[in-house]
Amino acid sequence: MKQNTLLAIVAVVALAAGLYFAVNIAPPATDKVKFMQQYPAARALPEFELYDKQGSTFTNQNLADKWTLVFVGYTFCPDICPTTMAELKSIYPQLQQIETEHPIQVWFLSVDPRRDTAERLNEYVDFFNPEFLATSGEHKQLFPLVRALGMMYAMSDNMDDPNYLVDHSASVTVINPQVQVVGRFKPHLEPGKLAVSDSEQILADMPIVVRQ
């Protein structure tokens, strides 16, 4: 009888010890992003100098210590740009509620400095949300920066037309607080619809991204 009691005590102690180690020592399971195309290694951005919507200088330091969702486009864009900006506007309040040491900001990077002056950028971006960042600059600054973001753009061959178009990527790229590119949300492709990044996918993944 005493032997059975002793064995029972040992079993209870072993169970308790197992639970303790499982909770306090075993590494917790980590969630994985479902939609963001995550790069194998974070990529540092080159040094750059742009102008923002207030006409002030904008550099890498403006991105430090925050998570940034950046979209490349131009204010005269007829479709993808306003649609994407509206999508980001719709989820911005929820993005601000994500628990993180480093807040999430939205950055509109114009690749059309000829038309997108600081005044124009301010008017355009404030229509969606006054808290959104907006910048542009010389092409010698923009080209290497946009490439480093994993995106591209190309100016129209006929820029004599005041309504010229600019080809550009439609992804939303994620920059970490160390000013490194970590991944991107690629456009959501559906027949008969604009190829834009899905805001609900961004909202689903960002809580996981900021924890990693």
Image (spheres, helix red, strand yellow):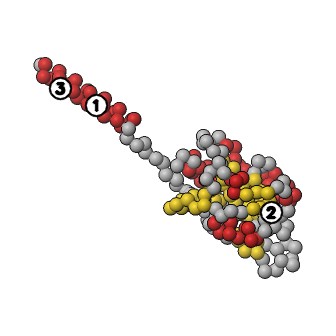
At x 79%, y 72%, the residue is 165
Residue that sits furthest to the bottom in the current view: 157
Q: Quadrant of the N terminus?
A: top left
168 up-or-down from 121: above or below: below
Q: Earlier in the sequence, mark 1 or mark 3?
A: 3
Image point (69%, 47%), residue name: 92
Residue 194 percent location from the top left of the image: 69, 65
Q: CA distance from mark 1 to mark 2?
A: 63 Å
Mark before the other along the chain sequence, 3 or 2: 3
Residue designated by label 2: 75
Q: Which mark is residue 15?
A: 1
Q: Is residue 200 above or below residue 194?
A: above
| Amino acid type of the residue that numbered disc 2 sits on in the rendered structure | Thr
Instruction: Kindly state the secondary structure of the residue where label 1 is placed.
Output: helix
- Separation (CA) of disc 3 from disc 2: 76 Å
Looking at this view, is 50 or 17 the one in front? 50
Q: Secondary structure at mark 3?
A: helix
- Residue 7's disc is 3
Circle 3 residues within 10 Å: few <14, some 14–19, many ≥20: few
What is the quadrant of residue 143 in the picture? Answer: bottom right
Taking the image as shown, residue 45 lies to the left or right of residue 74, namely left
Residue 30 placement, left or right of 66? left
Q: What x and y, as percent, mark residue 72?
A: 71, 63
Q: Position of residue 112 (x, y in %)?
A: 79, 68
Residue type at tag 3: Leu
Residue 16 to residue 60: above or below:
above
- Residue 120: image location, x then y, percent: 86, 59
- Viewer-side residue, 74 vs 82: 74
Amino acid type assigned to the residue bearing label 1 in the image: Leu
Mark 1 / mark 2, whichever is N-terminal? 1
Return the residue nearer the eye: 82 or 8: 8
Q: Relative to the observer, which residue lies in front, 110 or 41?
A: 41
